[in-house]
Every structure is written in C-alpha cells, then in structure tokens.
Image (cartoon, grey):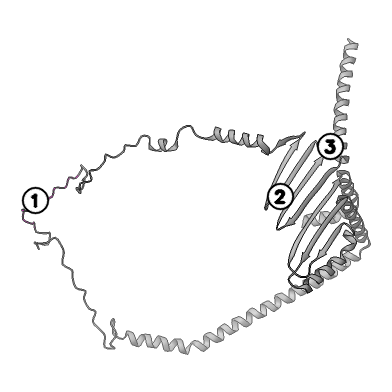
Amino acid sequence: MIHIILLILKIIGIILLVLLGLVLAAVLAVLFAPVRYRAEGEFRGNAQADGRITWLFPLISVNVSLRGGELSSRLRVLGIPLGGGGKRGRELEEDLEELTEPFIHTASLDGEGKETPPPQPDDGTETVPSGNPKVEPPPDAPQEPDQAGNGTSGETEKKEPKQKPSGPSGVSGRPGRGISSLARRMKAVLSWPARLLKGFKKRIRRIQKRFKAIRGRIRELAERKDQVLAFLKDEENRKTFRLAKGQLARVFRHIRPRRFRGQITFGFDDPYRTGQALSAAALLCPLYKNSLQLTPVFDRAVLEGEFSLRGRVRAAVLVSAALRLLMDRNFRKLLKRLMDR
C-alpha cells in the first residue's frame, strides 16, 4: 500500500515539475526570445512598402503590405494564415456568405396573407366602394336646389370682401394708429443715447472682468513657476530624472534598427528652399551618418527615395527598465501623484 502511495506521489511530482518547466520555458521565451522586424519600401509617385514581424523562429509572423495607399496585413502561426488572408480565407468567407443567405425571398414573406386588389378596367369609369354606392342622375333630370334654396348650379356665390373703413389719418385700420406709431418712433429715437450708454457700460464691465481673470491667471502661473522651480531644484527629483533619462536612452538604443539603408532625392521649385532643407539635414548627420544618402536637386521639385531596415526587440530589456524605475521610491511617489490628478 505504501509503495502505491509513493508511486502516485512520484507521478504527481513529475507532472508538476513538467508543468513548472513548461511555464518557466514560456516565461524565458517571452522575455529573451527577440521580436525581429524588417521593412523595405520606396516612393516614386506613390508609396510601396513591405514589412514583417517574427517571433520565436517564425513561430508567429505578421506580414504588412502597403500598395496604392491601402494597408493589408496577414497573421501566420506555424505557417498557417489566420484572419481571413489568402485563398483559404476567401473560400471561408464565401461559405459563410452562402450559409447566411435566406432560403426564402423576403418579398414572398411580405406579401403573404395580403389580398391583391382586383384589376380595374381602364375604360374611364370610376369604381365606387360597395358601402356607399353613388348613383349619378340622368342628364334629363331636373337639378335639385341646394341647401340655401338657390338652384340652377351647385357652385356657391363668392362674397366680395368688405373694405375696412379708413381712419381720419388716411391709414386703414383704427383711427389714430399713425399717431401712435409716430410716438413710438420718437420715443425710440430719444432713448437711443441711453441705450448706447448702457451698452458701453456693459462692455467696460466685461473688459474689467477679463483683466481680472488675466491677472488671476498670471498669479497662478507665477505660483506654479515657483513650485516648478522648487520641484526641479530638489535633489531627489533630479536623481529620478537622471534615472528616467538613462533608462529611456537605453530602451531607445535597444529598439532602434540595427541596419538601416536609405536614399532620398529631394528638391523644390525654389533653389533657396532646397539649400535650407539640405542645411537642416546636415545638422542631423550624426544621427544617420552613412546610413542615409541625400541627393539634392535644385532645378525642379521632386521627392523620391527608398529604404530598408531591420532590428529586434527583447521584452527583458523593457521589463528591466520598468523595474529599475519602479524600484525608485521617489519615482513611485511622483507616479502616484500623477495618477491621482
């Protein structure tokens, strides 16, 4: 009995060790297996570029292509395309469209249960509903008088509109209307200076409020300036800034392309602008050195070029930089203060 228990414990221990080894291998692969990237492209009238990202010896790869302003991508796992790319993806989309199409046309469902009206004869006669039949009198029958007793025609006589009596001032309507309108105009003209003065006072008040707001903002900026200067002069904060700067520079050096080659031909209509652009590019020469070749053209406007690059990124470098920052107590305090805002 004891041998069986020991054997079961041994098997459980082996399984746990295997699972632990798999988890450890997966963590190490994520941290230290590099994510490699490369890209090639050119621009001659329209941009064309191809890029690829691979991880763990092309276990997972992503292909990106730019053609005619349209961006397309394809994901592959162990060489099998995913995400509907390629011929298999198109066949799968066609099968799904066939499955989602209805078997019965919707027009037959809409018309089901509704009686279609009988066709009407096109002989100029009107069809009247069966509820209230309308009988037309014969042309020989005498015409009946209407309700008012006036009888040869069914048309009602139009009454002429009554004319409103005009007042003594010669204006139609109530007498004295022209005098009241004249009084209102005179009152409006006399009250114009008072309204102008009132509007001027409102504008002065608005300007005063704006000046007060500007002065308050200047005071706030002055107070913040003192706080910022005190914050920058603090020795702990300066150490944190140096640490953050060093880690960011380390990350940038790691993720930048290892190999880069490029060629650009550029020019403007004005040769002076071409010279200015060339002088600005000369200031950045220490960054690209011999990797980028610039060809200026002074007699026409042109922009053409091509490039190729490749590099790799390891997650371990990014994680170590983040841990170095989080281990700093002052950085955690600043980060917490920033998150509270």
Q: Residue at x 32, y 84 (%)?
A: 177
Q: Which residue is mark 1?
A: 138
- Residue type of the residue flagged with mark 1: Pro
Task: Answer with the quarter of the image where residue 57 lies.
Answer: top right
Give the Cα distance between marks 3 and 2: 25 Å
| Helix, strand or loop under label 3 | loop
Which segment is the magenta one?
132-144
Residue 147 position, x and y percent, is: 12, 59
Q: Magenta region's main secondary structure?
A: loop
Q: Residue at x 56, y 83 (%)?
A: 199
Nearest to the observer: residue 10 or residue 226: 10
Q: Which residue is mark 3?
A: 57
| Helix, strand or loop under label 2 | strand
Give the Cα distance between marks 3 and 1: 101 Å
Residue 136 position, x and y percent, is: 13, 50
Q: Which residue is mark 2?
A: 66
| Helix, strand or loop under label 1 | loop
Determine the residue located farthest toward the top in the rendered image: 1
Residue 256 seen: no
Task: Answer with the quarter of the image where residue 206 lies.
Answer: bottom right
Nearest to the observer: residue 307 or residue 32: 307
Residue 300 seen: yes
